[in-house]
Each structure stands twice: as C-alpha cells, then as structure tokens.
Image (tube, grey):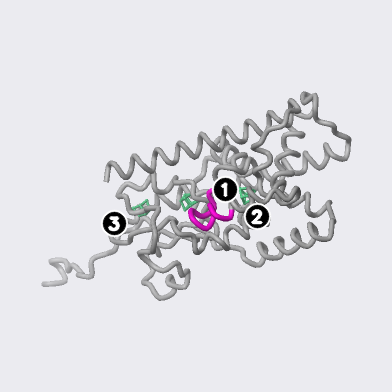
Amino acid sequence: MKLLKSAYKTAKWLRVAVSVAVMAATAASLVFGFDCWLRHWQLIPALATGTGIWLLLWLGVTLLLGRIYCSTACPLGTFQDCISRLLRRRKFGFTVPYPLVRWCTFFLGTGAFVLGITTVSQALDPSAGFDRIVTAVAGPLGASLAFTAGSMLAAAATLVVVGTMSFRRGRLLCNTLCPLGTIMGALSVNSMLHMDINPDKCVGCGRCSAGCKSECIDHIAHTIDLTRCVVCFDCAAGCPTGAITFRRGRHQLQLPLLREVLPKAVPGQESQPSVVETSDASRR
Ligand code: SF4
Ligand code: SF4
Ligand code: SF4
C-alpha cells in the first residue's frame, strides 16, 4: 500500500515536472523567437501541418492511457492548473458534465477548421490560445512577438476568459470549450488504463473530489467521469486508503445513473445506526 502510494506520488510529480517544462519551453520559444520541437507535437499544429507521426502517437497514447496529453503536453492546460493552484483557495467538488456545450463547440471548431474560417478555429484552438496568453503577458518584452492593437485585445480577452474559468472551476474550459478535450474525452472512455475507485476500500472522506480540478469524481457513487479526467494522478496520490488506482477494468460501472438507484449518502456524514435509543423516562 505504501509502495503504491509513493508510486502515484512519483507519477504525479513527474507529470507536474514535464508539464511545467513543456509550458516554459513553449513560452520561451515564443518570446525569444527560436524553434522548439515541443510546439510541433501539439495536436492542432500537427493537424495543420499534416505531421502524422504526432497525431498517431497521441491517438495511441490516448487509447492506452486516457487524456494524458491534457495533463502533460498542452501548455494551456498547465496554465489553467497554475491559476487554480496558485490563486484558488476553495475546494473543488463533483459537478455534472455539459455534453451539449462540448459537442456544439466541437462541431463548430471542426467545421470552421475545415472551411478555413480562421477567426473561429483560432479562438477554439488551445495552442493558439496559449500563444495569445504569452503575447498578453510578455508582449512588450518579447522581441519576436509581432502584435497589433487587435491582436493585443484578443490576447487580453483570452487571458481574462481562461484565467476566470480556471480560477472558478479548474479545467472547466477543457471540458466545455476545447474541441480537443471533447474528442480525447470520447476516446478516453474506453482507454486501456484509467482511474478507478474501489468501493470496498473507499472510506468516503471526499478528499479526491475536493482536489479534482476536472470536477469529475463522485466519491459518493464511486464513479469517475472518464470523459473529463485528465489523468493528473492527484486523486490517486492523495487517497488515504489507496482506493483510487490507475488500472484496467472497473470496480464499478461508470454510470452516473447509478446514483439514482443507490441509497443517497450525505457527504461528510456517517450513516446513522438504525437502533433508536429510548430514554429512561420513556421506558417508565
Ligand atoms: S482540453 Fe484542450 S486546452 Fe485543455 S489541456 Fe486538453 S488540449 Fe489543452
Ligand atoms: S480519497 Fe479515497 S477514501 Fe477518500 S473518498 Fe476518495 S476514494 Fe474514497
Ligand atoms: S479523476 Fe483524478 S486523475 Fe482524473 S482529473 Fe480528477 S484528480 Fe486528476
């Protein structure tokens, strides 16, 4: 159990180190104007330039391990984590998904990309979004960043939208507005390995859902919404009983409807004994 926990802690900190390094290298390449291969492995630039190797690699990784791209390789995802980690003081909690918003945005972004409507496709492209944020933050300092009043306005608007959403709801943007998040979420439902809760080991402390930036853990029903999980390992590293593991198969089907048929439990409240104690007075 101790070994398992330290393995998840190592995986978590490895993931943090890789994601921060990728974000820093991407930002530096933009500001100082050098070519960085980490920019080419991002999915939309790879799609735009037809770099099939990266597309195939990430497709394989997603089918195998879920949305690990979103917790390591996407600088915009890491930027959101930095905002919610550094500025947010409140805990997270399970929320319902917004599938209609996700799929409408997905088809809007895909249609715009295919038809060449760059204003819309660029607005929904996470790589372009991160570039705009770097422009907004480092614009006047970045020797290589060409910007106009219009592009600075777009950059500032992106910074405000991404900053506000991540401050308030963690990875909400990833699970509503990002077309890549939607398609990778759909693929992740059947990924070979995924996060899973063992109800027999869970003591219902709620630590996992309070720390989940994707707001996708329902610790009462013991379900994890795999379409929103970005495989960050935070929950597995923090679970005191080792109930959450990254594994094949499921201890319990991932059906939110189960909540309707399972007895409702109140978070933070232990089940009450069914024995009704009688006072001495009533006995008398
Ligand atoms: S969902 Fe989109 S913005 Fe979020 S981490 Fe994944 S690719 Fe990046
Ligand atoms: S942190 Fe572990 S024990 Fe606590 S509610 Fe989550 S799965 Fe259960
Ligand atoms: S379920 Fe766990 S691994 Fe997935 S996003 Fe939430 S905290 Fe991270």
The secondary structure type at the circle numbered 2 is: helix
In the displayed structure, 85 sits above or below 200; it is above
Q: Which mark is residue 69?
A: 1
Dividing the picture into quarters, in which one does residue 35 lie? top right
Q: Residue furthest bottom?
A: 261
Identity, as a three-letter code, of the amino acid under mark 3: Lys
Label 1 with label 2: CB-CB less than 8 Å: yes
Front-most of residues 243 and 231: 231
The mark that comes first in sequence, 1 or 3, is 1
Mark 1, Cα crowd under 10 Å, few <14 / some 14-19 / many 20+, is many
Q: Kindly state the secondary structure of the residue where label 3 is placed.
A: loop
Residue at 30% x, 59% y: name it.
270
Is the residue 141 above or below the residue 231 in the image?
Answer: above
Separation of marks 1 and 2 at Cα, in angstroms:
10 Å
Judging depth in this view, the residue of 232 and 274 nearest the camera is: 232
Identify the main secondary structure in magenta: helix
Q: Which residues are magenta?
A: 59-69
Q: Determine whether, in the image, residue 198 is placed left or right of residue 142.
A: left
Q: Amino acid at mark 2?
A: Leu
- Using the image, tell me which numbered label, if any, was put on residue 180: 2
| Disc on res. 201 | 3
Q: Position of residue 24 (x, y in %)?
A: 62, 31
- Asked whether residue 236 appears in the rendered view, the answer is yes
